[in-house]
């Protein structure tokens, strides 16, 4: 596939975007990050993708850094990790309210495919799971002695995967750790599954992306080097391509940057 790009917002200094998510019907794009002029008056920008010439709606009520925006599966609104991980808010796309005040700073947030569970990677090495359909009832599972840095649900929601600052990846099923995956040597930044649930990609500060065969984790992963800190990864809708967002590029390979 050949991708083309259209600029929605030009270069600016008054807002830093850290996270994006698209509504299930692909109409709205939510962008969150930091308003550096007043950290206590932060907001999420909501873009109407059917009218890109219109100014985005600003949804206020956020504090400090916003990360990990996830639209609800029914499109009724979105969750966001707010206040640098010290709060989780839900927005109905008009206003935002705090729904969870975590016991520890949350470094990464994930929403199950059916929207029934939120999972948070705790600074204290604990995995927190909240039931969105039962008053955000909490389950806490101690996973690591190190801060957790990434979390993801498998597509069917039967397995939760966490990564920590040492590069260790752990699989949790039924409330217990069932498998460790080693190889990364730096903080895990993001864990993503392809849409079929057959492959899992992990990105790290060790300059590597590892692509795991989730149906046969005994296989060694495919290791891809992006030559610098890999912030994020995503699979294309047809699962044929893997896209990586990196800090910068340090070298050329042949004529390719």
Image: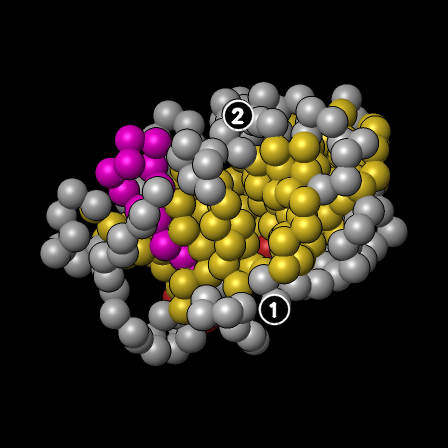
Q: How is the image coloured?
A: secondary structure
Please give the name of the residue rendered at 23% of the width and 57% of the height, measured from the top-left corner: 6
Q: Is residue 30 magenta?
A: yes
Q: Residues within 10 Å of mark 1 (few under 14, many from 20)?
A: some
Determine if residue 214 is in view: yes
Q: Position of residue 2 (x, y in %)?
A: 32, 47
The correct choice, above or below, for 102 with respect to 24 in the image is below
The correct choice, above or below, for 241 with respect to 185 in the image is above
> Mark 2 = which residue?
196
> Mark 1 = which residue?
228
Segment tinted magenta in the rendering: 22-34
Query: In terms of depth relative to the viewer, which is nearer, 139 or 209?
Result: 209
Whole-number angstrom distance, CA of label 2 to CA of label 1: 28 Å
Query: In terms of depth relative to the viewer, which is nearer, 26 or 142?
Result: 26
Q: Which mark is residue 48?
A: none
Q: Secondary structure at mark 2?
A: loop
Q: Position of residue 190 (x, y in %)?
A: 61, 50
Q: Which quadrant of the structure image shows residue 197?
A: top right
């Amino acid at each position: 596939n050949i991708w083309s790009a259209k600029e929605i917002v030009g270069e600016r200094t008054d807002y830093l975007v850290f996270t994006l998510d698209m509504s299930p019907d692909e109409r709205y794009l939510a962008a969150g990050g930091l308003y550096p002029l007043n950290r206590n008056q932060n907001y999420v920008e909501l873009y109407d993708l059917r009218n890109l010439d219109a100014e985005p709606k600003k949804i206020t009520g956020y504090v400090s850094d916003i990360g990990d925006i996830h639209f609800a599966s029914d499109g009724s609104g979105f969750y966001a990790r707010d206040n640098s991980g010290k709060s989780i808010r839900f927005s109905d796309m008009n206003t935002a309210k705090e729904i969870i005040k975590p016991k520890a700073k949350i470094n990464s947030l994930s929403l199950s495919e059916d929207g029934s569970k939120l999972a948070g990677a705790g600074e204290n090495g604990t995995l927190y799971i909240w039931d969105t359909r039962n008053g955000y009832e909490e389950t806490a599972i101690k996973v690591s002695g190190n801060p957790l840095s990434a979390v993801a649900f498998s597509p069917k929601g039967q397995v939760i995967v966490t990564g920590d600052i040492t590069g260790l990846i752990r699989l949790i099923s039924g409330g217990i750790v069932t498998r460790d995956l080693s190889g990364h040597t730096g903080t895990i930044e993001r864990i993503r599954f392809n849409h079929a649930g057959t492959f899992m990609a992990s990105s790290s500060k060790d300059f590597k992306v590892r692509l795991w065969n989730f149906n046969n984790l005994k296989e060694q992963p495919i290791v891809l080097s992006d030559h610098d800190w890999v912030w994020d990864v995503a699979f294309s809708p047809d699962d044929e391509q893997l896209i990586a967002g990196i800090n910068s590029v340090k070298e050329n390979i042949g004529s390719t940057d």
